[in-house]
């Protein structure tokens, strides 16, 4: 018989095959003998191991102890493959095999035992009879024994680790899934607890006087245990008939202590794991064992939020299983009501943040359990979703993370893609966790930094090309994805709102919805129910998501000023967008959008109207950045591009520009109502938007008139903003007060140029006022020379001649607001230079002019206030209102701006600030005037936003006044405070006006 051919086992070849130390590997193979050296299958299985060097080292030690192993390997390829796979990952289990080679047959078992079989095996190991109701380990002279002279605790550890070896061998060869491994580990731990309790029974006198149930918590309870983990338990006991309860609880406590010691005590065979009972009522400060009644009393009266979250996983695992089942059934009734507790969600979130804070800084980036993007992120998010939604959906009441996540996805509570990503990440991280713990059978969750350790992890996961690089990349990718999804799921404010709903409303029924709507103050509950039915009926995923959203959004609508309008608007927007794939996904997953949408729809008819004509704009509600006012230059470029695209169709071009304006009006209104911008910023944004719109319409009109004339446009044109537009103080309801000016090109007759300019001005006005879904922009040229009796457009020379000869004091006052806003910039500058001497006279206006202006103001107060209007509540012309404040600022400018350039501004508040800085106005007076002006401006804008139409007076009807006050940020009962605040602000402002404006 020829000798087996020698493998080319040079150090270099072995290193190329995957051994880190080729020379040492060559030596160890040689020491195994010629049969091993010639065994190609053996070498192949060694290099397949996660750590070939570790596998070979352990094999060498085992062969030294039991040389027959190599023959067994040749006879049983499965045994060889499984054992070397374990040796390559776990130095600790390798050590166990070397110490106990008799356990090798366990590797050959083809089937994993049932929980009952595991219990029987562990009990027999400690000499207990598994067929008795309360098994106890055998007690002989010299102590507790199991078998001939072997201490029971050691026997339990050997039996446990042999089964652990069996499971690990199936795990590393891919014969079972992560879920199966985790469940098997939990079942093995339960069996070990039963055997440990049997040891305790043999030590404790009167053990038969009490029923003791061991309740598994955490991962043990959920049947998703790690290889090495503290086993969390809670003990519940009941005295048997005729036994004093106090004595029985003392006995049960000794049993529990004995059971815990049997697992955690260090023996020559080491320890199993710690048994942790700190999840019991009152934690370490509370009794180790309680009766059922004591447990329930505590949970009903004193339990903290985290304790209900912990009970989600509770499962009887050892001892009196019937008592354990009764306990779990009783506490489950409390668990699924826990989300209704005050601040439940906030407490859970705060606990999650505290857990993160306790991770050592040098471990945070490598913690796969507690660090950002770790297992706890997934577990907490899933548990929170379960507890909140499981109140009304029994299908979510599952202990294990992966099965709960799948149920959440099926129910529409988590997006399918998100659930898939979380499940994949969870599986990967748990596999890494298992491999980390298998190596030394130590409880660890920290990814090592050592390259050799990272290489072992990567190879253990099947990454052979670049184990370290592939593992690190995959791990970081999963961690980033988990963190992103965790922020979206765990911190969803949606859950806070759902958690505060009474149980009957977490899922809609007709009766519950009716009661809810009436309680929340819906004016038309029947109409609201019709909207709800339309949104939630059916079995589609869309309807399922709506059923998840609506219980929360009903509360958000109720928090808004007008719940009925909010719900109606939501139905209308949903009808327009419900079939688009992104809309409901956006509302469910980006809850800031849903909450902001509810607030806006329930507050503003103006916003609702804009949204209904452009429902896709809902997407901009996702973040404050999306609602930020866009730069004027950006809008101007977009408008110019729209005009250019439709150069031959003026109405289409301006329609596109008006759609842009509608979108930006919506953006500004949403930012305004969300408190992201103040009233001055609103005025600036609206004025800049109007400038852009007028410029685009002017360009379109010039292009159209040029085409119609079939000749070059004969003049330069500029639009001068006046009034609130000129002051960059436009409101949502403001017309655009302007004047048109032109300058004929050289060689062009004035008549021809004026006709062309007039045609452009009229066309600009027409285009911006055309009936359309978009808000019109009315161009008002009534402040031009001679008013409506004068020409619509004048040349710059005509303006100069008019102002030189005919200008009145009120025209000089109106020109204080003049600002170039569109058209030819150079011509605009010429016009401003023309009017500056008129509005900023070098010596100030005369005393006669001051008296004339005061008379004019007094006449306006007497004549212009609408009949029946309350002067104390009219924001524009009422006492201490906008007009009062603006006339004070303008009179100061007319008198002093010629000598004090700081006063040369078109903005009211800037003029007041400058006057105070120049010593022309007491700073206290400036503050009073500014506060009144800001308050009145906010009210005018709020009136438009709330009602969808312009108004100047605080409304008299109570309901309308309530809606207005709520939109301004007052609480539901704060309407009278709002009115009184306004009266007080304007009363104080009027006192300043009387003194500063009317007195010298």
Image: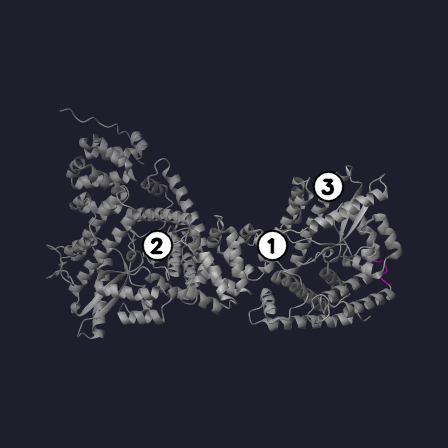
Asked whether residue 501 appears in the rendered view, the answer is no
Residue 879 in picture, x, y percent from top left:
72, 70
Residue 436 in picture, x, y percent from top left:
32, 47
Q: Residue at x 72, y 49 (%)?
A: 766
- Label 1 or label 2, whichever comes before in sequence order: 2
Along the viewing direction, whichever of 268 and 310 lies nearer the viewer: 310
What separation in Å lies between label 3 and label 2 (alpha carbons)? Answer: 64 Å
- Label 3 or label 2, whichever comes before in sequence order: 2
Circle 1 residue = 666
Circle 3 residue = 703
Q: Is residue 25 above or below residue 212?
A: above
What separation in Å lies between label 1 and label 2 (alpha carbons)? Answer: 41 Å
Q: Residue at x 24, y 54 (%)?
A: 187
Q: Secondary structure at mark 2?
A: helix
Looking at the figure, which quarter contains the C terminus?
A: bottom right
Residue 408 in picture, x, y percent from top left:
38, 54
**Residue 868 shows which numbered tag?**
none
- In the image, which is nearer the foreground, mark 1 or mark 3? 3
- Label 1 or label 3, whichever comes before in sequence order: 1
Circle 2 residue = 404
């Amino acid at each position: 018989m020829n000798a087996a051919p020698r493998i080319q086992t040079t150090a270099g070849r072995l290193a190329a095959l995957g051994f880190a130390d080729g020379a040492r590997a060559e030596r160890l193979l040689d020491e195994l003998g010629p049969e091993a050296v010639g065994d190609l299958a053996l070498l192949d299985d060694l290099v397949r191991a996660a750590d070939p060097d570790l596998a070979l080292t352990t094999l060498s030690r085992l062969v030294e102890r039991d040389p027959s192993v190599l023959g067994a390997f040749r006879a049983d390829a499965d045994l060889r493959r499984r054992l070397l796979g374990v040796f390559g990952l776990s130095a600790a289990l390798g050590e166990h095999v070397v110490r106990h080679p008799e356990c090798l047959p366990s590797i050959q078992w083809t089937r994993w035992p049932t929980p009952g079989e595991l219990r029987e095996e562990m009990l027999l190991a400690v000499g207990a009879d598994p067929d008795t109701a309360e098994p106890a380990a055998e007690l002989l002279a010299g102590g507790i024994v199991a078998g001939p002279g072997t201490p029971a605790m050691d026997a339990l550890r050997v039996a446990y680790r042999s089964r652990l070896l069996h499971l690990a061998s199936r795990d590393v060869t891919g014969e079972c899934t992560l879920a199966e491994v985790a469940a098997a580990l939990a079942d093995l731990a339960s069996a070990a607890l039963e055997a440990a309790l049997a040891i305790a029974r043999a030590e404790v006198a009167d053990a038969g006087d009490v029923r003791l149930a061991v309740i598994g918590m955490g991962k043990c309870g959920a049947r998703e245990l790690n290889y090495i983990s503290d086993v969390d338990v809670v003990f519940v006991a009941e005295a048997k008939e005729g036994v004093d309860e106090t004595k029985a609880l003392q006995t049960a406590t000794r049993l529990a202590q004995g059971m815990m010691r049997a697992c955690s005590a260090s023996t020559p065979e080491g320890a199993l794991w710690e048994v942790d009972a700190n999840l019991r009522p009152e934690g370490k400060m509370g009794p180790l064992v309680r009766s059922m009644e004591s447990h329930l009393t505590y949970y009903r009266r004193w339990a903290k939020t985290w304790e209900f979250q912990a009970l989600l996983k509770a499962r009887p695992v050892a001892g009196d299983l019937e008592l354990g089942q009764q306990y779990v059934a009783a506490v489950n009734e409390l668990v699924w009501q826990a989300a209704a507790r005050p601040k439940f969600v906030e407490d859970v979130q705060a606990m999650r943040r505290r857990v993160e804070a306790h991770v050592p800084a040098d471990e945070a980036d490598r913690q796969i359990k507690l660090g950002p993007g770790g297992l706890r992120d997934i577990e907490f998010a899933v548990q929170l979703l379960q507890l909140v939604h499981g109140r009304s959906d029994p299908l979510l009441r599952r202990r294990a993370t992966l099965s709960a996540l799948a149920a959440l996805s099926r129910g529409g509570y988590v997006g399918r893609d998100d659930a898939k990503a979380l499940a994949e990440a969870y599986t990967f991280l748990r596999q890494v966790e298992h491999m980390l713990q298998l190596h030394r059978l130590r409880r660890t969750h920290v990814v090592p930094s050592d390259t050799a350790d990272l290489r072992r992890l990567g190879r253990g996961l099947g990454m052979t090309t670049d184990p370290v690089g592939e593992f690190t990349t995959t791990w970081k990718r999963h961690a980033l994805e988990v963190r992103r999804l965790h922020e979206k799921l765990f911190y969803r404010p949606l859950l806070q709102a759902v958690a505060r709903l009474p149980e009957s409303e977490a899922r809609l029924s007709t009766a519950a919805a009716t009661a809810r709507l009436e309680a929340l103050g819906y004016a038309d509950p029947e109409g609201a129910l019709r909207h709800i039915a339309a949104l939630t009926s059916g079995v589609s995923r869309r309807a399922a998501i709506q059923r998840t959203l609506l219980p929360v959004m009903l509360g958000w609508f109720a928090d808004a000023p007008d719940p009925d309008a909010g719900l109606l608007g939501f139905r209308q927007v949903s009808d327009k967008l419900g079939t688009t794939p992104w809309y409901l996904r956006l509302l469910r997953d980006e809850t800031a959008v849903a909450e902001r949408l509810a607030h806006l729809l329930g507050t503003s008819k103006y916003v609702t109207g804009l949204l209904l004509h452009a429902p896709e704009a809902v997407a901009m509600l996702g973040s404050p950045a999306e609602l930020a006012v866009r730069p004027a230059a950006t809008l101007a470029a977009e408008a110019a591009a729209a005009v250019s695209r439709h150069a031959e169709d003026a109405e289409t071009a301006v329609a596109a520009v008006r759609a842009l304006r509608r979108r930006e009006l919506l953006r500004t209104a949403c930012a305004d109502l969300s408190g992201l911008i103040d009233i001055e910023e609103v005025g600036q944004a609206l004025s800049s938007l109007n400038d852009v719109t007028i410029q685009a319409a002017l360009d379109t009109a010039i292009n159209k008139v040029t085409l119609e004339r079939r000749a070059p446009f004969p003049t330069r044109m500029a639009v001068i903003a006046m009034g609130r537009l000129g002051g960059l103080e436009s409101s949502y309801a403001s017309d655009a007060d302007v004047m048109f000016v032109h300058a004929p090109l050289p060689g062009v007759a004035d008549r021809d140029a004026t006709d062309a300019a007039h045609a452009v001005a009229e066309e600009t006005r027409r285009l911006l006022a055309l009936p359309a879904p978009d808000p019109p922009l009315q161009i008002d040229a009534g402040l031009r020379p001679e008013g409506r009796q004068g020409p619509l457009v004048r040349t710059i020379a005509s303006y100069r001649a008019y102002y030189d000869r005919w200008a009145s004091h009120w025209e000089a006052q109106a020109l204080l607001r003049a600002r170039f806003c569109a058209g030819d910039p150079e011509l605009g500058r010429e016009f401003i230079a023309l009017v500056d001497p008129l509005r900023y006279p070098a010596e100030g206006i005369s005393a006669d002019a001051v008296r004339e202006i005061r008379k004019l103001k007094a006449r306006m107060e007497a004549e212009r206030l609408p009949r029946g209007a309350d002067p104390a509540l009219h924001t524009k012309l009422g006492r201490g209102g906008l007009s009062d404040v603006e006339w004070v600022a303008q009179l100061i400018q007319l008198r002093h701006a010629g000598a004090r350039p700081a006063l040369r501004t078109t903005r009211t508040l800037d003029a007041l600030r400058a006057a105070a800085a120049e010593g022309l106005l007491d700073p206290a007076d400036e503050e009073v005037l500014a506060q009144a002006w800001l308050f009145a401006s906010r009210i005018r804008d709020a009136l438009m936003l709330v009602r969808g139409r312009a108004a100047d007076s605080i409304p008299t009807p109570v309901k309308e006044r309530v809606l207005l006050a709520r939109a301004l940020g007052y609480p539901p009962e704060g309407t009278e405070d709002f009115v009184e605040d306004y009266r007080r602000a304007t009363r104080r402002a009027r006192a300043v006006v009387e003194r500063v404006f009317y007195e010298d």
